Amino acid sequence: MDEAGRVAIVGAGPAGLFTAAALLAQAPDLSIDIFDRLPTPFGLLRYGVAPDHASIKAVATTLARVFDAPGVHFLGLVDVGRDVTPDELHRAYDAVVYAVGAADDRHLGIPGEDLPGSRSARQFVAWYSGHPDAEPQPLAGVRDAVVIGVGNVAVDVARILLKDAAALSATDMPDAVLAELQRAEIEHVWLVGRRGPEHASFTTPELRELLETPGIGVTLAGVDPAAIDPETLERHARANVAAIAAAVAMSPEVAPRWLHLAFWHRPAVLRGDDRVRAVRLEPTGAGAEADGLEVPADLVLRSIGYRGVPVPGLPFDDGRIPNLEGRALELDGSARPGEYAVGWIKRGPVGLIGSNKKDAAETAAHVLEDLASLPRRRLTDLDARLAARGVTPSTFADWRRIDAAEIGRGGIRGRERTKIEAWHDLLDLVRHDA
Ligand code: NAP
């Protein structure tokens, strides 16, 4: 098996697992070790895709098949950069593929941004997805929420806030999250775009789903859709503008919950005392001379994009590992033979889960092309080095045990699954089986 080559993939999210699948499709005898910081595979499929998007989450079933191959192993609870260096991996494997995603978020850089009650949509998503590192999100007394940004993440968090909590009870959300969402008394959710609806990065099906959230009214500020000439727009932008105009026209006059869309506005300051209380929105673009809006806010979620995090020991530039079609590069553009990047750390934080398939195919093709000529590397004491540092990787069998426990928890309440979010509960289920 070793003669076919040994590959390490760092990150068991969609990009990493699509890469494993693409490698195995061409070279079924490859030995592939897939590392992850968590004992759970699937990355953003598990901790990013919204809980009420079950059909996208089902991609995990397909991706999990890579672990059926005899040469593929999951090594959870290993933090590459902390527990093992990229240099050690480079010396132990013929090829190392980094699929570490974009684990941080961008900041607005405005006064009040750090007030309690203001946080990133990424943190909010991690919380409702049951990520073990997520901080709790208190929602008692939250009536007014403001979401900054008009991408698909903003649409996800707005929808989760606006949906009747009972409608989420069939999802895999942790029990504590469901209970907190039931405590919220959401009445108003603002979605704020600094440009027009024709420039928004949300996709039309996701926008429509939000606009069609049962029981909501929809208002629009900062733009008149009738003044936008549809002939000047691309098809998706035209569909987005039309969907918004229709939703506003058909909105009920009285509703228990409201979605307020504000375009051509940006947040200038978050006001508050011991917590955030309001957001001052300033007009941008052609309407810049108009008065701004003062919007009450108990919760502010900035949803202005994710940001890559450097892996200690690897080059990092503009949120990504510098690379040419997935082949890692030094900062000066010279090659780093045997190291690769895929997914958001390769191309930046854009694209749907499925976008990773094509991206992974490109990186995998280069790995396979290079394997023929790369020198075989053999640092054989990696296990001993990890053990000496007190690191015992968890296995795919450990994940199966977590998986079964979640399905069991869900079954008690008639749900398909209830996620286990506490580190101690996850670690109780990890027995490091071979
Ligand atoms: P995104 O699509 O890049 O959206 C970021 C939004 O933030 C844009 O509206 C952007 O406006 C705005 N923004 C950036 N900086 C800002 C600032 N300083 N002030 C105000 N607004 C600012 O990113 P995302 O929503 O995080 O999504 C990441 C990727 O995941 C996307 O490709 C998305 O489609 C995908 N995703 C898909 C789904 C799904 O399919 N259901 C769900 C979640 C995420 P400008 O355009 O003006 O820069």
Image (cartoon, helix red, strand yellow):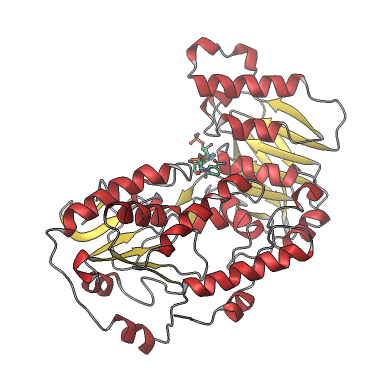
The reply to whether residue 13 is visible in this rendering is no
Give percent across and percent down for residue 414.
78, 59
The reply to whether residue 348 is visible in this rendering is yes
Give percent across and percent down for residue 118.
65, 53
Q: Which residue occupies 72% across, 63% down?
A: 410
Give percent across and percent down for residue 109.
52, 49
Indicate the quadrant where residue 387 lies: bottom left
| 220 relative position to 336: left or right | right
| 413 relative position to 304: left or right | right
357, above or below 100, in the image = above
Give percent across and percent down for residue 309.
41, 59
Which residue is outermost to the bottom?
Answer: 388
Asked whether 324 or 4 is in front, the reply is 4
Q: Quadrant of the C terminus?
A: bottom left
Asked whether 434 or 46 is in front, the reply is 434
Indicate the quadrant where residue 141 lies: bottom right
Q: Quadrant of the N terminus?
A: bottom left
274, above or below 257, in the image = below
| 76 relative position to 258: left or right | left
Indicate the quadrant where residue 139 lies: bottom right
25, above or below 393, in the image = above
| 105 relative position to 179: left or right | left
Asked whether 382 or 302 is in front, the reply is 382
109, above or below 178, in the image = above
Q: Which residue occupies 77% across, 40% down?
A: 188
Image label count: 0
